[in-house]
Amino acid sequence: MVLNYIWIAFFIIAFVIALVKLVFLGDYEVFPAMMDSTFASSKTAFEISLGLTGVLALWLGIMKIGEKGGVVNVLARLLSPVFSKLFPDIPKGHPVTGSIFMNIAANMLGLDNAATPLGLKAMEQLQELNAKKDTASNPMIMFLVLNTSGLTLIPISILVYRSQMGAAQPTDVFIPILLATFFSTLAGIVVTSLYQKINLLNRTILLTLGGAALMVAAIIWGFGQLDSVLMNKVSTTSANILLMLIIIAFILAGVRKKVNVYDAFIEGAKDGFTTAVRIIPYLVAILVGIGVFRASGAMDMLIDGVAWGVEACGGNTDFVGALPTALMKPLSGSGARGMMVDAMTTYGADSFVGRLSCIFQGSTDTTFYILAVYFGSVGIVKTRHAVTCGLLADLAGIIAAIAIAYMFFG
């Protein structure tokens, strides 16, 4: 329901702004630009779905091997103490626990192509437990918020972009991104738990969050001992080695269980094609709405309004130039990526705005895209508090990113 209102608002606001531009400013290009954006966005949505088909087939095939080989059940048992607190409605030891873990692990390593099919598999399993098939369940919402908060340990793609844009030290945003995304995820967990009346003040959760904080600190310290070139090599190599180990481990587990791993892979891979086709309408809807909103100039007006308000309050407006990336990130990952690159091109890769745009890009994930794809893949229409919790996590990530950027680069 919330997505419905937001989608309608995109078009109404865009139309009103475009009409005002036409009547009062004589801007005859705005409506053609908006219509062009609808066709371009529709094409992009289809291309994204088409591009996902192969990746979905690969990873759903691998997951099917792991499922039949018992790996997912092992992960579920290991994570049961923690996940039983965050996901109290999931039966203990259910295979979906392992799928959720695999998805979160892929996101943490910055392996977006692997994370999406793993997430869709987890969502399908959660839907099997869902009593109301058109309404998001509490476990679904907690899972979505963990995704949208974008916890990332190794932001490989951002470091690569900074290197390509000529940054003197492409990895100088590594620690700021790590800190900002940690706060975003923590805020998402807390807010969602408040909505769902989940008690976080228990020994298991406190030990887990404390252990996560220590792990983050250890990673920061370890990478801090490396120079920028070696850091890039180590982070990229580590992520890919771990990914390959997962594939090999699943295959060996299947062999150990005497599973026909080839047939199991084919069985799972077939679901990849049907899932990719199923999400096309949802992608077209959300990307067209975003495209029209951008083409009308509404985004520029929003940024200018924020700058005016900050100046009126006597605040520092250095961060405003990077805000398009922050505001676009919940809507479109590719759009935010484009704005991040544009900020580094316009202001410089080593400028405050250039660095902050990178931190924004890495501190949260594409909330509306994830909600549209994940909920759309299982036919969820009523999202309940998912959008609210996801956006509050995004807001926490944005605030943390600004504060941390001033701390490191201000």
Image (cartoon, grey):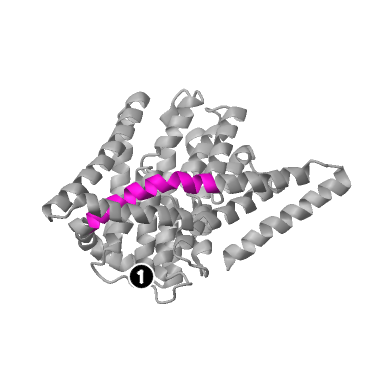
Give the residue number, with chain letter if any, for mark 1. 128
In the image, residue 335 above or below residue 126: above
Image coordinates of residue 254 in percent, x first then y, are 17, 52
Residue 219 occupies quadrant = top left
Q: Residue at x 56, y 37 (%)?
A: 338
> What residue span does the magenta drawing correspond to?
46-67
Image coordinates of residue 149 in percent, x first then y, are 45, 53
Of residues 273 and 379, which is closer to you in this image?
273
Image coordinates of residue 54 in percent, x first then y, are 39, 45
Number of dots carrying numbers = 1
Q: Is residue 58 visible?
A: yes
Residue 48 within the segment the image draws in magenta: yes
Q: Is residue 307 visible?
A: no
Residue 317 occupies quadrant = top right
Of residues 194 and 150, which is closer to you in this image?
150
Q: Residue at x 30, y 63 (%)?
A: 96
